[in-house]
Image (spheres, helix red, strand yellow):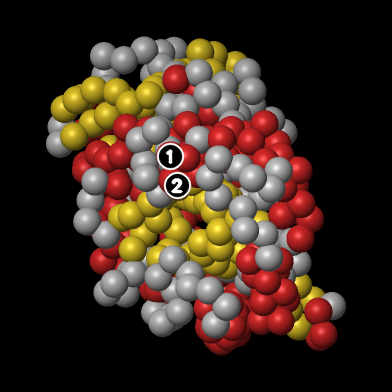
Amino acid sequence: MTGSMIGPDRLAVLRAATDGLQPPFAVVDLDAYDANADALVARAAPGTTIRLASKSVRSRPLAARALARPGFAGVLALTLPEALWLAADHADVVVGYPSTDTDAIAALAADPQLAERVTLMVDSVESLDVVEAAVGRAPAAPVKVCLDLDAALELLGGRVHLGPLRSPVRTPAQAVALARAVLARPWLHLDGLMAYEGQVAGMGDVIGNPLRQAAVRAMQRASSREIAQRRAAVVAAVSALAPLRFVNGGGTGSVEQTSAEPAVTEVAAGSGLYAPALFDSYRRFRARPAAYFVQPVVRRPSAGVATALGGGWVASGPPGADRQPTIAWPPGLRYNPLEGAGEAQTPLLGAAAAGLRLGDRVWFRHAKAGELCERVNQLHLVAGDELVGTAATYRGEGKAFL
C-alpha cells in the first residue's frame, strides 16, 4: 500500500536533510511530532491530561520531549521492568498490564521512591496474590495498584464481545469486590482505575466498503455510550470506598469521546505522536506522519522490479496487508504479493520501480508506532530542513522489555 497522508514537499525536505546518511535508518520529523503532540492536547476536554503511552514511543528523549509540553502528565508503561527504569526520570508511571515478574515486584516494594512513583495494574484477586507472594505483608513501602476495567462492548448476553479481551472485571459490583480485596490488604494502596476501549480508540472507520464503514461507526457510537455509562457507575461505586487519584481511558483514536466523560481524568495516548500508517484510516482526526524508515535498493531482478534491502518490519496483530509497512516514497510502488515485505529483501513493483537504481532509497512508514524502535538503535531527527541530531531508542540503550 502506498501512503497518501504525507505532503510531497515535506518528504522532499526530509529526503534532502538525510541525504548523507547510509540506509537503513529511521527518521522522526520533529515538526510533525510536535504538531501531533499539540493536536492531542487540543483534542482533549479541558482539565483532562494526556498520559504518555511509552510503548508507542520507545525512546526516552522523545518521550521526555512530549512530556515537557503542557497537557501531558505521567507515563503508561508496558511492563514493570520498563516502569522501574523510567521511574528514574518520571514521578508518575502506571504499568498498563498486570505483572507476574515477582523479582521486579519485590524490587518495587523494597524501594520507597519506586513505590511512590510506580503503580501496578491488577484485574483479579489472583493479581493481588501475586503481589503479596512477592512482597509479603510488610513491604518497605505500600504498593500502589490500579484496577483494570474491561471496556469491550458485549451484546447478546455476552455471547458477542467487541473489543480487546482484557480484564474479567466489567460491572460495578465486580469492581467493588476487587477494590474491597485491595483495601483489605494494608500493604496495598488503591490508586486509580483504567478502562481501555480499544474497539473505539484502536480501530479505524474508513477501511473497507461503505457498508463496513457504517457498521464500524455504529458499533463505535454504541460502545462509546455504553462504556461512558458503565465507567461512570464503576467510578462512583469504587470512589465510595476510597478516593481514586486518576481514572484513565481511551487512546489516540478516542481522545475527544473519552475525555468528554466527567468520570475520566486522563487519556492514554502515544501512537498519535508518530502517526503510523494504521492511523490513516480514522475519520475523526488527521495526524501528520512523523516516523519513517529508509531502505536502499540493492537488486534489479528485471526492468520492472526494484528490490529493497529488508523492509519486513511487520506490525503485531492479526496478519494482513494492513500490518505491512506503507510505502511512503516514491509514489507508484507496490509489494510483490508473493513475497510482500521481507526479512532480507522486498521486491517492489509498479510504475516507479523501473526508474529506481541501485542505492536509491525507498521510504516506508511502519503500520504501528513504537514497534519501529525495536529495529533501530537510534532515530535521526529532522527539524525544519535540517538534520539536528539523534534520539536513542530503547534498543539503542540496550533495553528490550517485550
Considering only vertical position in the picture, is 154 above or below 103? below
Amino acid found under the numbered disc labelled 2: Glu
Return the residue nearer the eye: 122 or 296: 122
Considering only vertical position in the picture, is 36 above or below 79? below
Return the residue nearer the eye: 98 or 210: 98
Q: Is residue 164 left or right of residue 398?
A: right
Considering only vertical position in the picture, is 204 above or below 337? below
Badge 2 marks a residue whose secondary structure is helix
Q: Going 54% across and 14% down the picture, which residue do you hit?
A: 299
Q: Quadrant of residue 51?
A: bottom left
Q: CA distance from mark 1 to mark 2?
A: 5 Å
Q: Is residue 265 left or right of residue 347?
A: left
Q: Going 37% across and 45% down the picture, which residue do you hit?
A: 91
Q: Going 69% across and 48% down the picture, which residue do you hit?
A: 137
> Label 2, on which residue?
116
Relative image position of residue 255 (x, y in whole percent): 41, 68
Q: Which disc number belongs to residue 305?
A: none
Q: Quadrant of residue 348?
A: top right
Q: Going 34% across and 69% down the picture, which residue do you hit?
A: 48
Instruction: Mark 1 and mark 2 in contact? Answer it, CB < 8 Å.
Output: yes
Quadrant containing the C terminus is top right
Residue lying furthest front: 138
Return the residue nearer the eye: 245 or 353: 245
Amino acid found under the numbered disc labelled 1: Gln
Badge 1 marks a residue whose secondary structure is helix
Relative image position of residue 340 (x, y in whole percent): 65, 34
Crowd tier of the residue under label 1, counting other residues whose Cα lies within 10 Å: few below 14, some 14–19, many 20 or above: some
Q: Which disc number belongs to residue 113?
A: 1
Relative image position of residue 55 (x, y in whole percent): 50, 42
Relative image position of residue 235 (x, y in whole percent): 54, 78
